[in-house]
Image (tube, rainbow, N blue to C red):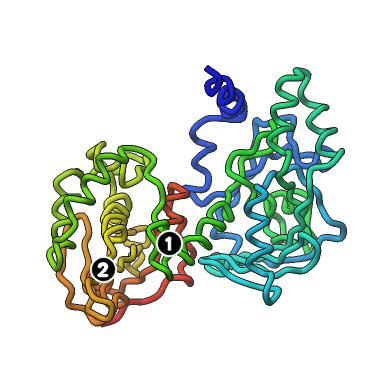
Amino acid sequence: MKMRLRLLPALLLVLMTSAGAQERNSSAEGILRIYRDTRPELLGRAPDRTSRIEVPLRSLNGSDTLPLDEAAPTAVLIRSEIVDFLREMTEATGAGSSGAVEAEHIGENSFRISFPDWGIENSYRFDPPGSDVRRVIDGHYTNVYWEELVSAEYSGNYTVTVLSAEDCLTPRGSISFQEALLAATLIGTKRQPLWGIHDGLGLLDGLGYSLVESDNRIIRDSSSHREFTANGVQMREILLSLRGKGAELPKTVYTLVGSMVQYEEDGRFLLPEELLFEGEGGCLEFSLACYDLLHRLGLEARVLALRLDSAENEQRCEFITVYRTEEFGPWGYMSFDEFQEPQNETWEEIPARVMRDNVFYYPLDPEETMRRGEALLPPRQAWSPSIY
């Protein structure tokens, strides 16, 4: 009973801040959203949530980054562990990178953060929530219970203050508050607790996890594998049954996943431990399931997104898992429709062999993709051509 009472406020907060499934999918669609009625005096909170500004993430690539005349504080929440990892990442040399994120320390709790694959660069300061945030919270909630619940979400975390941002709405050589709020929402946590602050895109949400995974991959420690969120006992039984397969392991994994999963693109994202027991999923989920089993069993594997470079196929995107069974050995691949034994000198040439056309590829970070529950694909210029 005691545990149930502790969990109840968090559950109520989710219900209170949720604005429906469509808003939760903004990052999956690659669209940055804020409310049109955003007010600077309310730190970006919008009393009227009926209208939104939507900016495709890809469109930011052509925008100029400009400094603000004055720093723009917002009530957009970012978790303290993200700020801690930014400090850790830049501590040695003042700059660092992890996966698709680059950061430069430019002042106390201040960082220039860029996403090279997207052509985005903004500068931020992360501030502990102060009296201004409390004023905005108190001004909206009349119920003391909700007021304290939302305040507790901010406690121990940070709010985002924008120092430079993309001149992306109506380019005119200066940054509006709406453009500053878009920059804050880009990195804000996906679930924002304050009513009237749009949920963030969360582009930094996997940062700390990526750093830990990078270290773990180097030492090949058993702790490198994420916790199963469902069907843990069954998944461990599957892994035990696959041990000792030797050179036959990749084909056995492919056959197993193929026998348990039928193709179905239904808009949902399922983790491998969910997919294998739900029985239906898409190309990305199939590839991640193959990767996850191979990775847990000690093989080197990657997940690639593929697309053809032609007008009629511009939106076509496939996902495959590439793997090898020896440290310096050849590479093979598997997808929903095909399995190939290792026979390719490099994994970079495999996309061209799969599609046999002018194909481009982009390597995903599988661990972060599973953590986020989506694959954010960058603009065309970040993809690489595959040639064999």
Q: Is residue 70 left or right of residue 188?
A: right
**Residue at (30% x, 68% y) in the render:** 300
| Res. 138 in view | yes
- Write down the quadrant of residue 349 in the picture: bottom left
Q: Quadrant of residue 43?
A: top right
Q: At numbered mark 1, what does the secondary structure look like: helix, strand or loop?
A: loop
Q: Is residue 94 left or right of residue 329?
A: right
Q: Which residue is mark 1?
A: 365
Residue shown at the point (59%, 55%) measured from the top left: 204
Would you place residue 218 above or below residue 16 in this image? below
Image point 74% across, 32% down: which residue? Answer: 151
Q: Is residue 1 above or below residue 100?
A: above
Q: Is residue 333 left or right of residue 45?
A: left
Q: Position of residue 376 (x, y in %)?
A: 46, 56
Looking at this view, is 110 or 169 the one in front? 110
From the top left corner, tell me how far across and down residue 235 is, in percent: 27, 44
Residue 273: percent from the left, percent from the top?
31, 43
Marks 1 & 2, CB-CB < 8 Å contact: no
The picture places residue 289, in percent across and down from the top left corner, at: 29, 52
Badge 2 is on which residue? 323
Q: Earlier in the sequence, mark 1 or mark 2?
A: 2
Q: Secondary structure at mark 2?
A: strand
Q: Amino acid at mark 2?
A: Tyr
Q: Residues within 10 Å of mark 2 (few under 14, many from 20)?
A: many
Looking at the rendered structure, the kind of residue marked 1 is Asp
Tell me if 269 is positioned left or right of 88 in this view: left
- For residue 228, which numbered disc appears in the image? none
Residue at 74% x, 30% y: name it.
47
For marks 1 and 2, give the CA distance: 14 Å
